[in-house]
Image (cartoon, coloured by chain):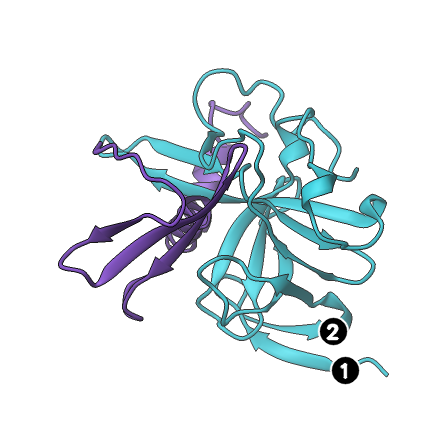
Amino acid sequence: MLVLSRKTDEALIIGSGEIRIVVLSVQGDQVKLGIEAPRAVSVMREELFRAQRENAMAAQSVSPEDLNALEAEPPAKPTP
Amino acid sequence: MITENTIRTRFHGEITISEKDILVMDYDILGFSQAKEYVLLPHRADSPFLYLQSVTDPALAFIVIDPLTFDPDYTLPLEELPDLGDPQSWAVLCICTVSRSAQGALEATANLKSPLIINRQTRHGGQFVLSLPYSYRYPLTGEDKSDAGAQPQNR
């Protein structure tokens, strides 16, 4: 991972200038960032991005057969 | 007056639901902002798993489970959640992913990090990403699951 130090009001450029991230303020362990990016670039908090990705995978994985098989494991007692 | 609606579902065919069955996600299921309304449908008798079926999109359903079914210590940080009404009325559900590994083994995980919280009285709620160090993929399969299904469904 690239590590850079920045002070308040200093910025980073990503790519050839189309994405700019500014440190607006630092208070304790909280950093406020300003992000300038083209509309087409999605900017999200990482935890929301991860939750969204998990949701998308979950929506694709839904299968009653697999769920039945899952509940049958470990080998259930044979039903009479 | 109670309005009834017939909806198409992913696994339950056409069903008739009442307006009071509808759960409204004021706080989006992340990535599914277009689908606000759901109903809970059973997987089968005695199963802790339920389906959260979209009312408007027949193809959209999630497998969900009450996290207390397998983690009796699961707690919500009330201070970081919006006002959803009396916490005693909250239903908490975690979205599950069930998949097969390359070897064909079944793998199931539950997203404890971003649960759905719905007030059972108002039927409003949504998905929240907690700051607690819970897993997005808590394994439901594998080693010790001897207690699975032993806990009560309601809190």
Q: Is residue A56 left or right of residue B87?
A: left
Q: Name the spot of residue B112 as percent of width and height, x first.
A: 55, 36
Rendered colour, chain A:
purple
Residue A43 in view (yes/no):
no
Give the SS element for disc 1: loop
Q: Are marks 1 and 2 in contact (CB under 8 Å)?
A: yes
Return the mark for residue B88. Answer: none
Q: Name the spot of residue B2 as percent of width and height, x first.
A: 82, 80
Residue found 59% across the figure and 45% down from its top:
B115
Q: Residues within 10 Å of mark 1 (few under 14, many from 20)?
A: few
Mark 1 belongs to which subunit?
B
Provide the residue designation for mark 1.
B3
- Amino acid type at image mark 2: Ser
Provide the residue designation for mark 2.
B18
Residue found 71% across the figure and 28% down from its top:
B151
Q: Is residue A46 left or right of residue B117?
A: left
Rendered colour, chain B:
cyan
Residue found 66% across the figure and 66% down from its top:
B24
Residue found 78% across the figure and 40% down from its top:
B154
- Amino acid type at image mark 1: Thr
Q: Residues within 10 Å of mark 2 (few under 14, many from 20)?
A: few
Q: Is residue B39 left or right of residue A54?
A: right
